[in-house]
Image: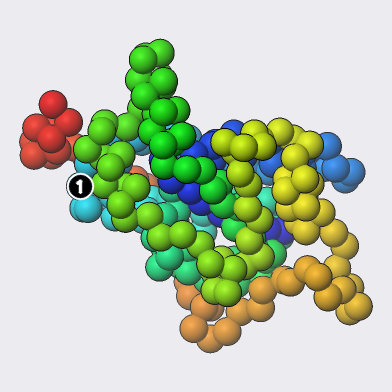
Amino acid sequence: MALVVICGQPCSGKSTAAICLAEALQAVEPKPTVRIIDESSLHLGRNQSYADMTVEKNLRGVLRSEVDRSLSRDNIIIVDSLNNIKGYRYELWCLARASRLRYCVIFCDTEENHCREWNNKRSEMGESAYDTKIFDDLVRRFEKPDRRNRWDSPLFELLPSRDGIKQSSPVISEAVSYLTKMVDSKTRDVRVLQPTIATQNVRATEANSLYEMDRATQVTPDNLGFLN
């Protein structure tokens, strides 16, 4: 059916947006099959996954492989991760295009100071939080989505620090409508991507997914030193 890419700074409300979207989709009849793919679902930790460029690249490979393996015309896949690199969002767009699916990006546009405050609160409460050095690096390298890019369109923008995020949020409702609206020859406001020769690549196998997951979950002595 569709691929949804959740995008935003660390601790910007992405997971809340993913959950609210999934719940809103489950309230639609007929109920679509919805799955959220994120680091925790693959047993990957925040700081471990972004300790350096190598493990971060491996993380993106694991997520991409799992998305590719999970896409079908019978479900909606929500990718709940930073998705902070425009080139990576393009790769995910290509997967949706190769599978002839709908695609959209939901951007949690949260100010850096609010993200930092929410991250600090998580740390104080003993919940999973980013180390300061990793948080600062991710904020610095974030590439904001631009609706003029094919891979960032259609773009639904949430303002969590101002409006909050609820299942009934207007932006969530708009995304649900886009993802579930019936499409026929007269439909103009919903686009189902069509593959080209360039995007018709071989589907990722389960073995490839397991291989990339194994690489991403390996913590080298250097990484252990970084985390300490």
Q: Residue at x 44, y 28 (%)?
A: 118
Residue 150 seen in this snapshot: no
Q: Secondary structure at mark 1?
A: loop
Residue furthest toward the bottom? 197
Q: Residue at x 57, y 52 (%)?
A: 107
Q: Residue at x 8, y 39 (%)?
A: 222
> Residue 57, how many percent across, how many down?
29, 55
Position of residue 156 in the picture relative to residue 63 (left or right): right
Residue 10 seen in this snapshot: yes
> Residue 83, how many percent across, how many down?
45, 53
Relative height, residue 161 to residue 123 (above, below): below
Amino acid type at image mark 1: Asp
Question: The N terminus appears in which quarter of the rendering?
Answer: bottom right
Which residue is at the front of the view, 58 or 137?
137
Relative height, residue 133 to residue 120 (above, below): below
Which residue, given by chain and number where applicable, does mark 1 sit on? 52
Relative height, residue 199 to residue 11 (above, below): below
Q: Residue at x 34, y 47 (%)?
A: 139
> Residue 114, how many percent across, how many down?
46, 34
Neighbour tally class for label 1: few under 14, some 14-19, many 20 plus, Cα within 10 Å: some
Position of residue 220 in the picture relative to residue 6 (left or right): left
